[in-house]
């Protein structure tokens, strides 16, 4: 069973005691890097829809990226609500090693990362368009390569989708009929109204990712016991491949 998640926009390199692996798609990422390094700060602002400060930061980061074992472990490098909610600093060595086999981080730049892949800070969202005359968008650039990589490491054909729609779209169209993907939906209920709130959903995805890895889960049914931070499984609104979790808000 493979769980796949989204990256975060913000990153911070960190040193870890674990031996690092190289990303699978170094050649493809190098091609993207060669394109990105040709941009000036105004190009980056327009293509990535960022302000001048972030454009300059990204330009400096592109110049520093290498494809070697001297980077930072992917799982520890992203700084965002989902990753903060994982509390990775509390994971055991066994949980980290389990994640190396069962958790994948999707990326517009790196394609797919294992938790201990050596990466460098970057910013390139999957929805970026107009990268070059040849690469109109990253969905077409990566095509089915990301799904094929997940499939190579998934021995039972079961996937847990804890990614945002932006990143899940790089995977879901390429599932075959023999495979099963369980989509996880987090909904809050406030004053009787049910809705999805981005902040709560991001944190819940991170907490569930941590739950799966720390408990070393290998069947989807085990996920139904997830109850962190007030979430509980909503059997009435769930089905075989769509698990809904709800949380009641009082304010």
Image (cartoon, helix red, strand yellow):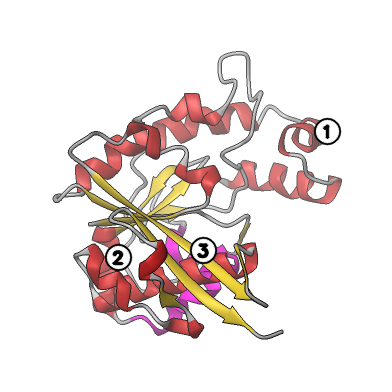
Q: How much space separates mark 2 and mark 3, taking CA atoms?
A: 15 Å
Q: Residue at x 19, y 65 (%)?
A: 218
Q: In which quarter of the image is the C terminus?
A: bottom right
Q: What stretch is highlighted in magenta?
A: 72-91
Q: Which of the labelled discs sits on residue 206, or is there none?
A: none
Query: Residue 155's spot in the image, x, y percent?
Result: 14, 50
Q: Quadrant of the N terminus?
A: bottom left
- Element at badge 3? helix
Query: Can residue 13 be seen from the camera position used here?
Result: no
**Mark 1 Cα-neighbour bin, 10 Å: few <14, some 14–19, many ≥20:** some
Say which label, 1 or 2, has the lower sequence index: 1
Query: Residue 160's spot in the image, x, y percent?
Result: 33, 56
Along the line of sight, the residue nearer the viewer: 54 or 237: 237
Q: Which of the labelled discs sits on residue 42, or is there none?
A: 1
Q: Mark 3 points at which residue?
A: 77
Q: Is residue 199 above or below residue 68?
A: below
Q: Which residue is drawn at 39% across and 39% down?
A: 171
Circle 1 or circle 2, nearest the eye: 2
Q: Mark 2 points at which residue?
A: 99
Circle 2 or circle 3, nearest the eye: 2
């Amino acid at each position: 069973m493979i769980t796949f998640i989204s990256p975060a926009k913000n990153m911070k390199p960190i040193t870890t005691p674990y031996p690092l692996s190289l990303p699978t798609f170094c050649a493809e990422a190098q091609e993207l890097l060669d394109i990105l390094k040709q941009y000036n700060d105004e190009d980056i602002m327009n293509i990535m829809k960022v302000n001048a400060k972030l454009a300059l930061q990204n330009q400096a980061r592109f110049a520093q990226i290498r494809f070697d074992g001297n980077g930072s472990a992917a799982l520890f490098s992203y700084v965002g609500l989902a990753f903060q909610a994982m509390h990775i600093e509390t994971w055991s060595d066994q949980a980290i090693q389990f994640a190396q086999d069962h958790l994948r981080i999707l990326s517009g730049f790196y394609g797919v990362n294992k938790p201990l892949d050596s990466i460098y800070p970057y910013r390139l969202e999957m929805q970026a368009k107009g990268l070059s005359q040849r690469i109109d968008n990253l969905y077409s650039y990566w095509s089915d390569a990301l799904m094929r990589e997940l499939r190579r490491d998934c021995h039972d054909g079961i996937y847990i989708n804890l990614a945002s729609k932006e990143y899940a779209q790089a995977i879901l169209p390429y599932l075959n009929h023999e495979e099963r993907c369980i989509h996880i939906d987090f909904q809050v209920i406030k004053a009787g109204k049910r809705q999805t709130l981005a902040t709560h959903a991001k944190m819940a995805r991170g907490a569930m990712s941590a739950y799966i890895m720390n408990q070393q889960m290998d069947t989807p049914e085990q996920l139904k016991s997830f109850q962190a931070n007030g979430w509980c499984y909503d059997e009435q609104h769930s089905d075989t491949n769509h698990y809904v979790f709800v949380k009641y808000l009082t304010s």
